[in-house]
């Protein structure tokens, strides 16, 4: 999973990125501190995997990972190249989902690129630049399709859809909110439009506001209202708090989070929200050699899941020996789970479930 962190300059993007990845990206009080995208790989927190690690004491422990990309701050005119915008927009096309950081705090010592704090305006600025960039791509696609239509009338449906999509974007609507047929949806997915990517709005608060009642915060209400209109998710977060957490050991982190009334860090909440947003789950493999988590899409069948481990596993798939994580832990061992009849033999049509502990049988 590759997540792009975007937003206007000085909204806390790089501070948040540093905190959740410990990658040491530059963070300073001026626009375009980030020029090249910084990349950090983060292990997906999974207490199930930690428990299996205790049970098996394997030679190797491999959690699932998330790649965070800190993309430089966008400004008005980015789609036309302002602030090196074209390059930054190209970076966004490469990610699976967008974490759009929105400034929800006042601080006279941190300049705002537009001179004042206005989350609604900031969100509209970024969205408009993404829309304008998509419009250029759609217009090129329309020109190409018109040429193809001269040779083959089957492209008429594609052209009709593209022209409808262009009108949708021209009215400052996001591609992901367009009504489409299943065929049109496949065409839309293949275009890799910026405004068709799933988005989580990370509402970035000051530490003081974050520890208070954010539900009545005027900035947060602006973010939530806009996110609700486009069926997107909002995640309240505080980059300052995440930076503090990043310096703590596990015990200190637990105490600190309890003191501010949270069960999980912002990183944990962000990863969970992104898994849900993208429809992802994890299955687990466990043994003395390795305990590992594998990320797949909801609805993935056993052979395809086996292929995540090795293509030979999918090609020569025979069956999957499956036990749920809870049943394995309550039984104490795989042999005990087998004796209790909790270990199942599943075939090619089995749909994988989150937390399945699996041994794939194959022959090539």
Image (cartoon, rainbow, N blue to C red):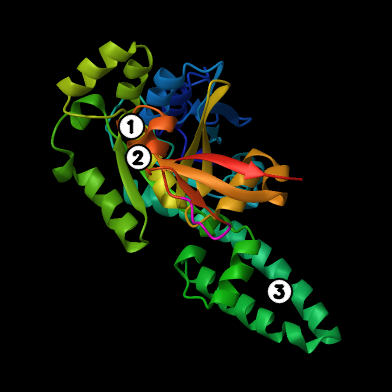
Query: As displayed, is residue 112 above or below residue 156?
Result: above
Q: Work out how far the residue at label 3 is from the one at label 1, CA to CA, in angstroms.
A: 60 Å
Asked if marks 3 and 2 touch (Cβ < 8 Å), the reply is no
- Residue hosting label 2: 340
Q: Nearer the viewer's eye, disc 3 or disc 2? A: 2
Main SS type for the magenta part? Answer: loop
Q: Give the range drawn in magenta.
A: 348-352
- Can residue 65 be seen here? The reply is yes
Q: In which quarter of the image is residue 289?
A: top right
- Residue hosting label 1: 331
Q: Where does residue 33 sit, x and y in percent of width and height?
A: 54, 26
Q: Which of 304 and 33 is in front in this view?
A: 304
Is label 1 in a helix, a strand or a loop? helix
Query: As displayed, is residue 195 above or below residue 336?
Result: below
What residue occupies the far bottom of the structure in this picture? Answer: 153
Residue sitting at x 41%, y 21%: 55
| Label 2 neighbour load within 10 Å: few <14, some 14-19, many 20+ | few
Q: Nearer the viewer, residue 138 or 243?
A: 243
Q: Where does residue 295 sit, x and y in percent of width and height?
A: 52, 41
Q: Which mark is residue 142?
A: 3
């Amino acid at each position: 999973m590759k997540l792009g962190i975007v937003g206007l300059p000085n909204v806390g993007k790089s501070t948040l990125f540093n905190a959740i990845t410990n990658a040491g990206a530059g963070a300073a009080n001026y626009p375009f501190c980030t020029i090249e995208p910084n990349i950090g790989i983060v292990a997906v927190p999974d207490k199930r995997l930690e428990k299996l690690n205790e049970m098996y004491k394997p030679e190797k422990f491999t959690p699932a990972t998330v790649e965070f990309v800190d993309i430089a701050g966008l400004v008005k005119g980015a789609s036309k190249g302002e602030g090196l915008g074209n390059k930054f927009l190209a970076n966004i096309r490469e990610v699976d989902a967008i974490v759009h950081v929105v400034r929800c705090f006042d601080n006279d010592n941190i300049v705002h690129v537009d001179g004042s704090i206005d989350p609604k305006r900031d969100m509209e600025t970024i969205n408009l630049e993404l829309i304008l960039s998509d419009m250029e791509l759609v217009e090129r696609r329309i020109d190409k399709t018109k040429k193809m239509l001269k040779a083959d009338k089957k492209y008429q449906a594609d052209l009709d859809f593209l022209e409808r999509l262009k009108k949708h974007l021209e009215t400052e609507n996001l591609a992901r909110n367009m009504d489409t047929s299943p065929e049109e949806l496949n065409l839309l997915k293949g275009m890799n439009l910026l405004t068709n990517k799933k988005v989580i709005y990370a509402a970035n608060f000051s530490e003081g506001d974050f520890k208070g009642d954010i539900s009545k915060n005027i900035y947060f209400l602006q973010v939530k209202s806009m996110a609700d209109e486009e069926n997107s998710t909002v995640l309240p977060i505080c980059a300052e708090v995440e930076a503090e957490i990043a310096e703590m050991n596990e015990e200190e982190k637990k105490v600190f989070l309890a003191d501010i009334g949270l069960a999980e860090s912002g990183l944990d909440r962000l990863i969970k929200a992104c898994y849900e947003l993208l429809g992802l789950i994890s299955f687990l493999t466990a043994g003395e050699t390795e305990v590992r988590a594998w990320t797949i899409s909801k609805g993935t069948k056993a052979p395809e899941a086996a292929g995540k481990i090795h293509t030979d596993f999918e090609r020569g798939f025979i069956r999957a020996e499956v036990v749920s994580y809870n049943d394995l832990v309550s039984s104490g061992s795989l042999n005990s789970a087998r004796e209790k009849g909790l270990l199942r033999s599943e075939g090619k049509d089995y749909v994988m479930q989150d937390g399945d502990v699996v041994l794939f049988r194959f022959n090539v």
